[in-house]
Image: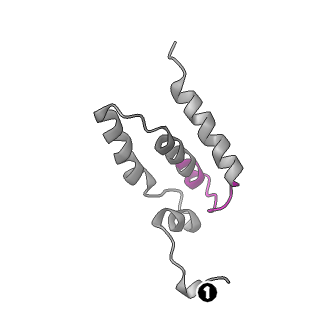
Amino acid sequence: ETLPEEHRTYVSTWVDLQRQHGECEASYLNGEILLLGEKYGIATPYNFALLDIVERMAAQHLPPGHHTIAEVRAMIEQKKAELTQPSS
């Protein structure tokens, strides 16, 4: 059974992407998590990767649901690998 549209609610990041304005509040929300992780020495690779994905989607005016779950997982793993590579 599907919930009627008038009874559905959506998170603000989803709404931002759906409106395709080119920006979203994800950097405000996840950016704080990244700063706290850095401050306390806690790695936040998933937040970093998801923020990167959402910011690119917003900049490219891509709607929610553009990427499959498999694609998002692959992008997260790629970003994690980039973050854990030793710097030259």
Q: Residue at x 50, y 16 (%)?
A: 87
Rendered-image quadrant of the N terminus: bottom right
Residue farthest front in this picture: 1
Question: Which residue is more in the foreground, 54 or 3?
Answer: 3
- Residue at 36 percent of width and 46 percent of height: 33
Q: How far across and down, in percent of the image, does residue 66 sit?
A: 68, 58
Query: Is residue 44 depicted above or below 20 in this figure?
Result: above
**Magenta highlight on residue 34:** no
Residue 17, picture quadrant: bottom right
Residue behind mark 1: 4
User: From this viewpoint, which residue is outermost toward the left?
Assistant: 39
- In the image, the segment drawn in magenta is 55-68
Q: Judge left or right: residue 85 versus residue 70.
A: left
Neighbour tally class for label 1: few under 14, some 14-19, many 20 plus, Cα within 10 Å: few
Query: Residue 60: horizontal and vertical position, in percent?
Result: 62, 52
Residue 59 magenta-highlighted: yes
Q: As displayed, is residue 27 above or below residue 87? A: below
Q: Main secondary structure of the magenta part?
A: loop
Across and down, in percent, residue 69 comes to: 67, 53
Q: Is residue 16 left or right of residue 69?
A: left
